[in-house]
Amino acid sequence: MAELEEVCRTYRMGDNLVHALHDFSFTFRRGEYWAVMGSSGSGKSTLLNLLGCIDRATSGTYRLGGEDVAELDDDQLSDLRSRRLGFVFQSYNLIPQLNVLENILVPLFYQDEPPEGGEERALALAERVGLGERLDHRPLQLSGGQQQRVAIARALINDPDLILADEATGNLDSKTALEILDLFDELHGEGKTILLVTHEEEVGERAEQILRLKDGAIEEVVRRSPEAV
């Protein structure tokens, strides 16, 4: 699904060169559910940005579904993100002027040839996340948990190969966070590949595998049987 070989990502901050990731090699396979964990500055967000084609590696190779991302220009990357990736953010990143249905449909707007039946799929996803009766509501009329459900439906509208979630429960109360994690469990059970960045141990324990980072490198890989989750 996603393969990184000797990937480095460096940033210049003033006179200093920061190695956010260095000589990072790892393969995420189709259908896996990973929690990516580590302290602040460990490289979690950098890794997610590279996997999501939001950022480019300084060196090394990243292949998504066998395709070398470095060979794609900005337009091709945008098209790839809209077709093959689904994003769920801590701050939801909904468009305040759009209602629930329109926000779910946003990824299809970026495709040169949007698939037929997009609105029907959006309606079905709204129902699935429990917002079928709130289609005309705008984000500010929704609770945090409801906004995150819209974000998850939006992430699913293009039937993505890979779902990338960045602290997806970070702004939610414990009850709502558990409901969102239950939804991720359902999606994983249906065969979706999920990478969930989190600093919360109880959230990370919900995943089948845990990848711990430290100082831009892999500190630990924990693989558990499905029965242990």
Image (cartoon, rainbow, N blue to C red):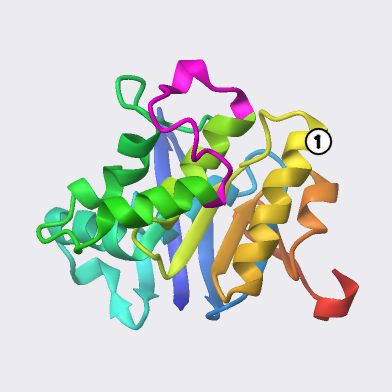
Q: How many numbered marks are there? A: 1
Rendered location of residue 97, percent (x, y): 30, 20
| In the image: residue 164, left or right of residue 225 | left
Front-most of 183 and 134?
134
User: In the displayed image of the protein, which residue is found farthest to the top?
Assistant: 140
Front-most of 206 and 13?
206
Is 109 rendered above or below residue 173? below
Splitting the image into 4 quarters, where does residue 118 fall?
Answer: bottom left
Q: Residue at x 62, y 55 (%)?
A: 196
Q: Residue at x 19, y 63 (%)?
A: 116
Asked whether the viewer can see residue 203, the reply is yes
Magenta segment's dominant SS is loop
Q: Secondary structure at mark 1?
A: helix
Asked whether the viewer can see residue 20, the reply is no
Magenta stretch bounds: 128-144
Say if the magenta span includes residue 140: yes
User: To which residue does mark 1 refer?
Assistant: 175
Splitting the image into 4 quarters, where does residue 199 fall?
Answer: top right
User: Could you tell me the amino acid type at mark 1?
Assistant: Lys
